[in-house]
Amino acid sequence: MGAFAPGALARVTSCERLELAAETETRGAAETRARRPRVMLFHCGGTLGMGVESFREDVEADASRPVPVRGGGKYRPLGASEYLLDISVVVPELSDFAEIEVEVLMNKDSSEMACEDWVTLARALDARREDFDAFIVAHGTDTMAYTACALSLMLVGFNKPIVLTGSQLPLGFARSDARQNLIDALTCCVASKTCGGAVDFYEVAICFSGKLLRGNRAQKTSATVYAAFSSPSYPALARLGVGVDWNHARLLPKAEKYTPRFAFDSRVVRVPVIPGMDMSAAYGDLYARGIRGIVLEAFGVGNFPATLIPWLTDQTTKGVRLLLTTQCSSGVLRPELYAAGLGAIAVGAKSGPVMTIECAVVKMMLHLANPTEFDLHHALSGEAETVDFCGN
């Protein structure tokens, strides 16, 4: 047998080792894939998934800026790599985090979303709860906060991450924020599975522009900047930069019981208090027009003119439910400090820690359809906890 150079191997041995190495690598890759979390991405519509052809130059208005031709955008058949259905091609980094499936549940401008759509989405999440580790919901920004509130109150105890995200520009645009929002949303979704148990994140949240916010505490506060959402009454759950800075103390703990609810009554109206307004002239008999819930947006900690009491008394006596909230973005409600607030409480008004107006409206809708299951001032999913920001 001939001699070989130092360190050299016979060809047969080299091939055997190469094959063994390849087999080991394949097996390791398969095991890695098997360990990756399974994430379902439900698409509901909005700017993120819109096709570029949904924008055009507004010639009639003599403007050079692009405007949407139709709400909800357009979808091309599977295989057009610049659209959401081929998300693994458009944003290949996502496959590093999880096995992702995409389902276009609906394709609506978010301003067209209604209670029926919240129920459709909630039922889809409920049906797949056991099959996936986490869920992303691509949604239009205009009513994303309402949908997040609805899901958090409908799916109490779901105990798996549900993260809503979207974008200010479509995924196909060069300067779109959609790519980073999707990556950030998925990063947060799988954190409880990929961080060795160090992150206990199991709630409904909104991930946008580097921040993870509790869904029922978030509000859209800008129509034009990338940082479109804020949470004035509750600290961010996480901030995403080079790393992810989790606010562990503010994460909602796992619930002991899963209690889904799928019934809404949308006969609710927001009534902002305006100085000097005659409520009878402005709103008349709301009960006679079919309204069954009023969310009264008072001043400060719950104050309003005493002249409103007769109108409120008339409406609540007829059967309208009344929830007091405030026009302030944060703080506490103390209507009992004022005569008008005491009068409202005397005629059946409910109040409690400050909720966002979006959450107050959704909670009233849910309460009207499920009156015996919870009271309006009883917190269901972290929507009404008073927080001292000095310690955060």
Image: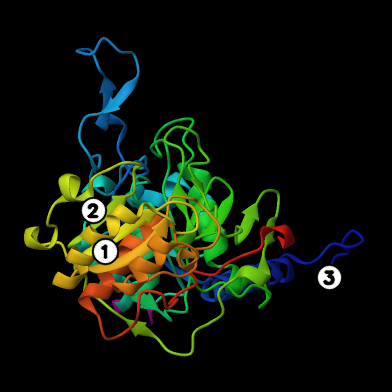
Location of residue 381 with respect to 61 vertically, above or below: below
> Position of 10 compared to 195: left or right?
right
Amino acid residing under circle 3: Met
What is the crowding at mark 2: few (fewer than 14 residues within 10 Å), some, or many (at least 20)?
many
Name the disc covering residue 118, or none. Answer: 1
Query: Which label's residue is closer to the chain start, 3 or 2?
Result: 3
Q: Residue at x 80, y 66 (%)?
A: 9
Location of residue 132 with respect to 268 vertically, above or below: below
Does residue 109 appear in the picture of this structure?
no
Q: In the image shown, does 249 or 371 lie closer to the viewer?
A: 371
Q: Which residue is drawn at 57% across and 67% down?
A: 386
Name the disc covering residue 261, or none. Answer: none
Amino acid residing under circle 1: Trp
Horizontal and vertical percent position of residue 240: 64, 52
Horizontal and vertical percent position of residue 352: 46, 70
SS state under label 3: loop
Horizontal and vertical percent position of residue 84: 35, 48
Residue ID for mark 3: 1
